[in-house]
Amino acid sequence: MDERRPYIVIVIIQTIYAGMFLLSKAAFNDGMNSFVFVFYRQAFATVFLVPFAIALERKTAPPLSFVAFCKIFMLSLFGITICFNLYGIALVYTSATLAAATANTLPVITFFLAVLLRLEKVQLRTLSGATKILGVILCLGGAATLAFYKGPHLKPLLDHHLFGQHNSSEGHVVAHSCKTWIKGCFIMLTSNILWGLWIVLQGKVLESYPSKLLSTTLQCFLSTIQSFVVAISIERNIHAWKVHLDVGFLAVAYCGIMVTGVTFYLQAWCIEKKGPVFLAMSTPLSLIITMLCSVLFLGEIISMGSVLGGILLVGGLYSVLCGKSMEIKDGKSTVEDGNNKERSNSMFIAEDEKGRIEII
């Protein structure tokens, strides 16, 4: 049973993410403002995380310097506030299936940003380097396919869907309009780029303030304030801020507690047991779950372009992960052979003075 536990946990994680895509889209179809949604989501996450942060890390946390606070503030602004607001806008314009599909670009985007910031190096003349470059190309091809190719629509299994909103037909017209669809695709990719940048820079921030839970809680708190400023400057109608016991409230509570709170712990546990590659390789599972549930529960119409684009994105994800695994394997074998053995076009993993793993 212990050997199966990581696989069960990984299914739970991806199911939670699929629920986030579906419930968020359902809330927007029901008329909830996306900016107000982000504010309430971060507020729920903050309220949920504060007691745990105080109880677990209050005594062991180092003092927070002004420089570290500024880093956390900027990280929460771009990596959470702007990222989540762009994600909400894109989800209004597109579909839950596309949101799940573009989530597969995150490891590829993170790798690409790490190369640009010189946190990782790529040897183009090695098989592993070529494999990762192929993954980036497949990822770009998948994103272009999602944006510019619709193709024939796949016939839904059921005409009735669970979340029947009064203005859902209007939402589908907006989502499937050609201009808004293309705009939504690029906004979604921009959101993923900011999220990938958040992942890359998270390590730098943790060097200044190593308390992970308190850092996460502080980012949620700061993003709550930032999201409120953004939302109140755009949405002045007081009725749009009212939260009723409907799908909007369910989506806000779910994203704030389950996504930010529960998956934070589950992902940390899964990485500790099986490593980050195992977690990243499970990302396409949320696409499959979201695609099936969006047809059954939201009545979304899946196009052939979405399917082909999703396949290319998944192929790009696995290509990058495969190249990364080959680098690690080759690095270990090179170290075992000894540093005095020269090999042409070879590479190994080294650890610099800051403890950062670097491919040379």
Image: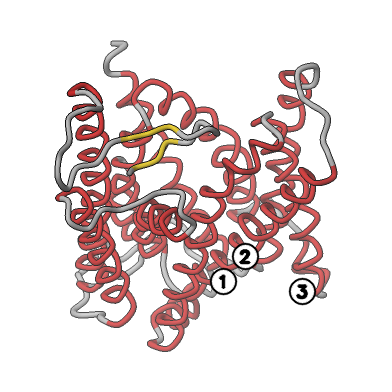
Q: Residue 239 appears in which quarter of the rendering?
A: bottom right
Check the picture and name the quadrant holding the N terminus.
top left
From this view, report whether residue 344 is shown above or below residue 197: above
Residue 271, horizontal then vertical, whole percent: 41, 28
Residue that label 1 marks: 89
Residue located at (40% from left, 49% from top): 120
- Reading the chain from its start, which is encountered first: label 3 or label 2? 2
In the image, which disc is placed on residue 150? none
Closest to the observer, 18 or 311? 311
User: What amino acid type should be assigned to the residue bearing mark 2?
Assistant: Asn
Q: Which residue is mark 2?
A: 85
Q: Residues within 10 Å of mark 3 (few under 14, many from 20)?
A: some
Give whichever of discs 1 and 3 has the lower sequence position: 1
Residue that numbered label 3 is attached to: 235
Q: Are marks 1 and 2 in contact (CB under 8 Å)?
A: yes
Residue 197: percent from left, percent from top: 53, 56
In three-dimensional space, the C-alpha distance between marks 1 and 3, rounded to whole angstroms, equals 14 Å
The amino acid beneath tag 1 is Ile
Residue 244 image offset from top left, x and y in percent: 71, 55
Mark 3 or 2: in front is 2
Query: In this orientation, which residue lies closer to the viewer: 308 or 321?
Result: 321
In front of the other: 68 or 83 = 68
Above/below status of 29 relative to 214:
below
Q: Secondary structure at mark 1?
A: helix
Q: Contact (CB < 8 A) between labels 1 and 3?
A: no
Count of marks overlaid on the render: 3
Which residue: 44% across, 68% down?
A: 189
Q: State the separation of the CA atoms marked 3 and 2.
A: 13 Å
* Residue under the image location 41 percent in, 80 percent down: 181
